[in-house]
Image: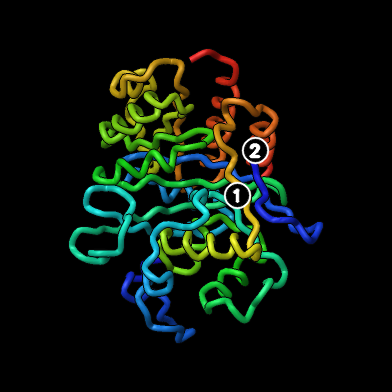
Amino acid sequence: MVSVQSDQRDDDLAVPVAVKIVVAGGFGAGKTTLVGSVSEITPLRTEELLTAAGEEIDDIVGVEGKNTTTVALDFGRITINTELVLYLFGTPGQDRFWFMWDELASGAIGAVVLVDTRRLETGFAAIDFFERRQIPFVVAVNCFDGSYSYTEAEVRHALDVGDAVPLVLCDARDRESSKAVLVRVIEHAMSRIGVPA
Amino acid sequence: MTVHSGDWWYDEAAGPLVRPYALVSGRTRPVWGDLHLTTQVRSIRTSNDPASLSVEHTEIMKLCRKPLSVAEVAAYLHAPLVVVKVLLSDLIQRGDVITRDPSRMATAMDMNLLQKVLDGVRAI
């Protein structure tokens, strides 16, 4: 739900609703490329400091010392209108930042699992993550080199995803192609409304 | 952006050369606790008490004249999220910044919202 925390003293002090789509995939799959091709801004990077244990820091003792690390999140923005903004968040590529995914996925309308046909196996972990949390996702096969050498059935078999999960081919560098991926995610999320898990 | 954390707030603007956590007096927990990556924040036109604001608070007030997410504020200021959350929570408590939670679990309940997102993405 939404909550405005202070009295709005000016009528034009509207605060938009924000929604997000998570773009996941292994290192080098093209996540930031996809975000950048549709974002209205050059993808931004924000950084969170974390302890080695993977929790948000509670205390500054030791901060910036050996026991902390920085996780970078890249994201883009699509302003739909003055009342609605869509954010696209890329997941951190490194496996050791898995714990960040919960915050990223929380409240997301859906997700893209971007895979590179040369390294299909990098998609497994993300597929498993979204399946477990019942977050609607599509698998997007990034064919940026133009050498898409597998059939859809082969990719589905290799990734062990059934027909209920949409699978799309894309070129993450191409704006229209990336837009089509996002459209598919939103349509898939809509199709899941009212469907019992 | 690949600004090293040690360079934070040290740029052509020649701002104060201090560690991020000094700016928030070592606090790592925002007083006002519900700030997420996509929470929208927007400053009111003029602070309730501008003289009592720090330079960093004032920077955030300027940045948020247009609504932005917490993540965007952190990115534009090259500051760690945890620090920006503390600074924003100060401003929210003062009534200088208003906020709106990200839409949570929109998929579970709001077909109308999803339709708007779909139409919006198709139109870009």
- How far apart marks 2 and 1 lie (CA) works out to 10 Å
Which chain is mark 1 on?
A
Q: How is the image coloured?
A: rainbow
Residue at (48%, 69%) from the top-left corner?
B77
Residue at (30%, 55%) from the top-left corner?
A50
Residue at the extreme right of the image, as rendered: A11
Q: Quadrant of residue B23?
A: bottom left
Rendering coords of residue A90 (x, y %):
42, 46
Rendering coords of residue B117 (x, y %):
64, 38
Q: Nearer the viewer, residue A124 or B41?
A: B41
Indicate which disc residue A12 carries.
Answer: none
Label 1 Cα neighbours within 10 Å, binned few <14 / some 14-19 / many ≥20: many
Relative to A9, say whether B9 is above or below.
Answer: below
Q: Which residue is mark 1?
A: A78
Task: Residue type at mark 2: give it.
Answer: Val
Q: Nearer the viewer, residue B68 or A66?
A: A66
Q: Which residue is mark 2?
A: B117
Relative to B69, say whether A162 is above or below.
Answer: above
Residue at the extreme left of the image, as rendered: A66
SS at circle 2:
helix
Residue at (50%, 46%) from the top-left corner?
A88
Relative to A102, say whether A156 is above or below.
Answer: above
Residue at (46%, 48%) from the top-left corner?
A173
Residue at the extreme bottom of the image, as rendered: B14
Q: Nearer the viewer, residue A176 or B98?
A: B98
Rendering coords of residue A121 (x, y %):
25, 32
Q: Nearer the viewer, residue A113 or A37?
A: A113
